[in-house]
Amino acid sequence: MPPGFPRLFLMIYSPLQTANFSLAALLILLLPGLAWLVWSRTRRGFLVLLADAVGISVSLTALIALAGFYLDSRFTRPLLTRTSPLRSTR
């Protein structure tokens, strides 16, 4: 290991925080693809459905990033976390 590298780099967060981050990452990875597959009413085995969901989610993310690149759009934090015009800021 390089000098100054934390020995237990993965243990920075508590186990509960690590579980929360892992669950959020899993949902972000699976939900777009699962929504697509449910909408298309595909009937397949569980593992095939899971693999298709991950593949579709990664593909959609890549296509959105490619469209943003070609349209010279910047996906900045203020743009992504902007409050809805319907929500009051009082």
Image (spheres, rainbow, N blue to C red):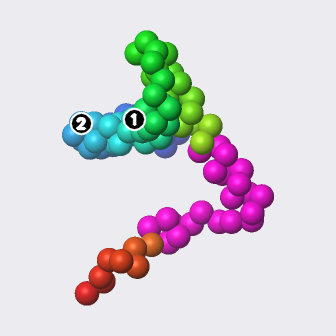
Question: What is the x, y in percent for residue 74?
Answer: 65, 66
Circle 2 sits on which residue? 15
In the visual, does 8 lie left or right of 78? Answer: left
The amino acid type found where label 1 is placed reads Leu
In the rendered image of this protein, does residue 63 appear above or below residue 72?
A: above
Q: Nearer the viewer, mark 2 or mark 1?
A: 1
Name the residue at 68% across, 65% down.
Answer: 73
Name the residue at 40% across, 74% down.
Answer: 84
Q: How crowded is the residue under tag 2: few (<14 C-alpha within 10 Å), some, or many (20+)? A: few
In the rendered image of this protein, does residue 48 appear above or below residue 3?
A: above
Please tell me whether mark 1 sits on a helix, a strand or a loop.
helix
Give the position of the C terminus as an image quadrant. bottom left
Name the residue at 65% across, 43% down.
Answer: 62
Q: Magenta stretch: give its range.
A: 61-81
| Residue 89 included in the magenta stretch of the image | no
In the visual, does 35 lie left or right of 73? Answer: left
Question: What is the x, y in percent for residue 38?
Answer: 43, 32
Residue closest to the far left: 16
Q: How crowded is the residue under tag 1: few (<14 C-alpha within 10 Å), some, or many (20+)? A: few
Residue closest to the far right: 70
- Please tell me which residue lies in front, 45 or 58: 45
The residues bearing labels 2 and 1 have C-alpha atoms spaced at a distance of: 16 Å
Question: What is the x, y in percent for residue 7?
Answer: 40, 34
| Residue 29 visible in this rendered orientation of the protein | no
In the visual, does 24 lie left or right of 5? Answer: left
Please tell me whether mark 2 sits on a helix, a strand or a loop.
helix
| Residue 77 included in the magenta stretch of the image | yes
Circle 1 sits on which residue? 26
- Please tell me which residue lies in front, 42 or 58: 42
